[in-house]
Amino acid sequence: MPRKSTTGGSRVRRALVVLAVLAVQVLAGLGLFTGAARADDGTGRVALIGVSGLHWNDLTQADTPNLWELAGASAIGSMSIRTVGTVTCPYDAWLTVSAGTRSAVGYRCGAPPTPEPQGAGAAIPHYRYLIDVAGQRNAGVLGESLKAAGQCSVAIGPGAALGLADRQGAVQHYHSSPLQVKTTDLEKCRMIAMDVDDLVLPYLTSGRLPRVPDQLSAAERRDALRLADAKAGALLSVLPADTTVVLAGLSDHGSVPHLRVTALREPGAAGHLLGATSTRREDLSITPDLTATVLTKLGVPVPATVVGGPLQVGDQGATVDRLRDADADAQAVRSVKGVYFTVMAVLQVLFYLIAFLLLRRRKGLVPVRVAGAALAAVPAASFLVNLLPWSSVPQMIAGVLGWTAAITALAFAGPWRRAPLGPLAVVAGATALTLVGDLLTGTTLQVNSVMGYSADVGARYYGLGNIPFALLATGTLLTATVIAHRWPGRAGVAAIVVLGTFAMVLGGSGMGSDFGGVIAFVPGIAVTALVLAGKRVSLVKLGVFCVAGGVIVMTFAWLNYLRPPDQQTHLGRFVGQVLTGEAFDVIFRKLQAMLATLLSPNLMPIVIAAVAFLVYAILRPEQASAGVVPAAFEHSPALRAGLIGTLVSGVLGMLVNDSGAAVLSMALALAVPLLLATGIGVLRPPASAGGALGELASARR
């Protein structure tokens, strides 16, 4: 509905808040909301309260007393509510609850449709459109599962009706408002769902989510919050004592995604964190987890198509401030991510331009070498910064610069600095070890990092992201080539195979849960080993290696699929999607995302500049780089093999991952500056250079 920002509109909303609270108190005093008995089988009830647009900054004791009290008696966590698009509207959110998997109506949406009353229940108008036209095959899974188990349900509000509707759009018992609910209504059924839309409705201009982050003033949002709190309180005040209550902030309210509220009230849960197996985090869950939770609590079998897992009560120590900080961290990373990659692209392009101008004149070789190592150290620093307790964007940037300086200093601090491959070994090794250590310790460094993933975006919550894969593959192959350079022959080839296989298995197993990375990494390892062994690499062999990567990753996926549904990662769920015919839709969405990256102004300049410089430096070595690249290859054939393997993994990784150009750009951003740094370390400078440069040249081996 149109947003009203006048003073009169605010006064009307305040009056409605007062009237709603008074109505609840009067009806309770008349005995209409007296306590209800337990369900017939004595196993209790579940009430799902969805407050669209609610995040933890909204909850205060003064403005939302009912929700504040509920949170204090519950295990609490954050919820990543992304469905298919960047932001989630109430319609898509409740449809996801219904389906148990990320779902979308298929166009820019807003509120769920208003049900049409049918006796005690209702029907969702044009419901079959979702299944027959919009391709939402799983719509109605929750309602059908409850019906098949003989469990009735009560829906209050349009969103709740959509969430509990069966495959034909029918809702068993429906009320448009909690003020219409009587004690006998709650005695009938063990499943209760309520859509609290008062907070989000003022945002739905023309029935759609606005294209601005937050179009309401603080006062207007408080008014809407009070209405939402009163409605939630109306239901909370009449729920039977044996009811397990789940509170979820189900949708976004503007153009920027946020982490939303989730709470679970049951005996012994107060003060604990709330997470789920789907995210492998004790303070984070996703919308499909609500479907799995409801069915599990009611003792109803969870269909295999439901991708979520039941909410899990974690450790003690949950506070509202902690969860507010989680969203603040995610927003900080979001605000700086675009700028970060833009700066990366500018620095990479400037580096190649300056290196081209200086190297062809054999000037400034030492600064170029140091700059190359420093530029290559930035990716690892972007993860290591999460070891520090940063709380603002300036602190995060300072931390990244600090770690970059530390890695660069280490690269040139020890005796290895005199070896041409010394700085490369330090920077590449630090990058690989950072990501290996992160995978072995639960991937805490990749969360809320500019080169990792953020929970509010909802693309990944654990394991190895696409950009980290590119860095792990490149860092591992380059580190292995240093070992192969030191111990040539079979020992060197064995080092590449062993280290590469270890990193590949780590990334593709349950720790990394990386699908496309394995497909791309296997050919990279194989090509590096073949080139180092002096074997010819043909297109046929490359194709065989790609097939082998696919077989390996599908083996990982099949083994994961054999685990219980609530313990599967997206690898196992992909096998299920293949079996149900849904895999094509997933692959098509990833292909679209990959193609979109090819036009990225932040990523493609890195690819174009690095590839152009590399090709020109090989074809016209004296004109482009004073022979730096050929000198590096002549000094270390293993490095040449490692770079070829890196390019193979990077190109294939770009084609099979939805991050597309980001994979290849980050592989090049790490490998090519280190290649130049190595070549400068090999070159014997003019006699006049002297000093540190002469020291570098004398280290040629």
Image (tube, rainbow, N blue to C red):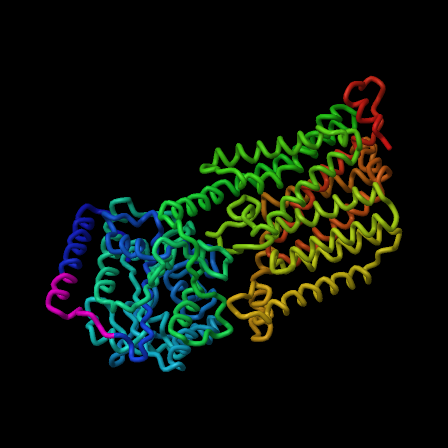
Quarter of the image for residue 508 reads bottom right
Judged from this view, the residue extending furthest toward the front is: 268
Q: Nearer the viewer, residue 185 or 2?
A: 185
- Quadrant assignment, res 670: top right
Dividing the image into 4 quarters, which one contains the C terminus? top right
Numbered range of the magenta stretch: 23-37
Q: x, y percentage for residue 60?
A: 28, 48
Q: Is residue 312 above or below residue 372?
A: below
Name the residue at 82% across, 17% down.
688
Q: Is residue 552 left or right of residue 23?
A: right
> Relative to residue 18, is residue 498 drawn left or right?
right
**Quadrant the N terminus occupies:** bottom left
Residue 27: say if magenta: yes
Q: Residue at x 56, y 50 (%)?
A: 443
For this rendering, which residue is in front, 69 or 428?
A: 69
Q: Let me know if residue 47 is in the magenta part.
A: no
Across and down, in percent, residue 391 comes to: 45, 38
Residue at the location (46% across, 46% down)?
A: 330
| Location of residue 15 in the rendering, given as x and y in whole percent from the top left corner | 15, 53
Residue found 39% across the figure and 50% down from its top: 318
Of 616 and 124, which appears nearest the observer?
124
Q: Position of residue 645 (x, y in %)?
A: 77, 50
Above or below residue 402? Residue 463 is: below
**The quadrant where residue 188 appears:** bottom left
Q: How many marks?
A: 0
